Image: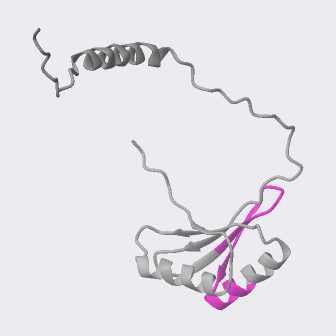
């Protein structure tokens, strides 16, 4: 009788065949799977309309205006200095803390002037300060 020789290698060819078949199955079935759709609950109109933001307008000569929108769609503008601006915005924040404030600067205004206004508003603890930009035309 002949003795069998001990085999010390694994034949991986069948495993590769199985993996390739599974890969093909997943590639074919993946586009057919429906993504989970979520049905969101619906509500009627909200009880309160969102507040119109207060706009701090910085002109090219670095003078500032405060632009406010009234509930009856009237817009009022008035020239303002930095101390007056901080005082007015702090008073508004006490009445309505969720009132947003946006800074609209002329494109020719130096970046430093805009940062100075933002810094003053942050020091005065004014919440929700953002920048107003115009979308680019394509």
Position of residue 39 measured from the top left corner of the image (x, y, whole percent): 73, 29
Q: Closer to the camera, 1 or 97? A: 1
Q: Quadrant of the C terminus?
A: top left
Q: Quadrant of residue 6?
A: top left
Give the residue at the far front of this rendering: 1
Q: In the visual, does 75 lie left or right of 72?
A: left
Asked if the stretch drawn in magenta spans residue 42, the answer is no
Q: Residue sitting at 57 percent across and 19 percent down? A: 34
Please count the marks in the image: 0
| Vertical arrangement, residue 11 with respect to residue 41, above or below | above
Asked if the stretch drawn in magenta spans residue 71, the answer is yes
Give the residue at the far top of this rendering: 1
Position of residue 19 measured from the top left corner of the image (x, y, whole percent): 32, 20
Highlighted range, magenta? 66-87
Q: In the visual, does 121 lie left or right of 97?
A: left
Q: Residue sitting at 78 percent across and 55 percent down? A: 50
Q: Residue sitting at 85 percent across and 75 percent down? A: 95
Position of residue 46 measured from the top left corner of the image (x, y, whole percent): 85, 46
Q: Quadrant of the N terminus?
A: top left
């Amino acid at each position: 009788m002949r003795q069998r020789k001990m085999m010390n290698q694994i034949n991986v060819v069948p495993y590769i065949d199985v993996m390739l078949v599974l890969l093909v199955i997943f590639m074919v079935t993946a586009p057919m799977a429906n993504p989970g759709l979520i049905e969101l609950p619906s509500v009627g109109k909200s009880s309160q309309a969102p507040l119109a933001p207060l706009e701090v307008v910085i002109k090219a000569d670095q003078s500032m205006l405060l632009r406010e929108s009234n509930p009856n769609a009237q817009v009022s503008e008035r020239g303002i200095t930095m101390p007056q601006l901080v005082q007015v915005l702090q008073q508004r924040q006490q009445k309505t803390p969720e009132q947003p404030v946006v800074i609209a600067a002329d494109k020719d205004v130096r970046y430093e002037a805009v940062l100075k206004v933002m810094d003053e508003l942050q020091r005065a603890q004014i919440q929700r300060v953002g920048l107003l930009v115009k979308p680019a035309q394509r």
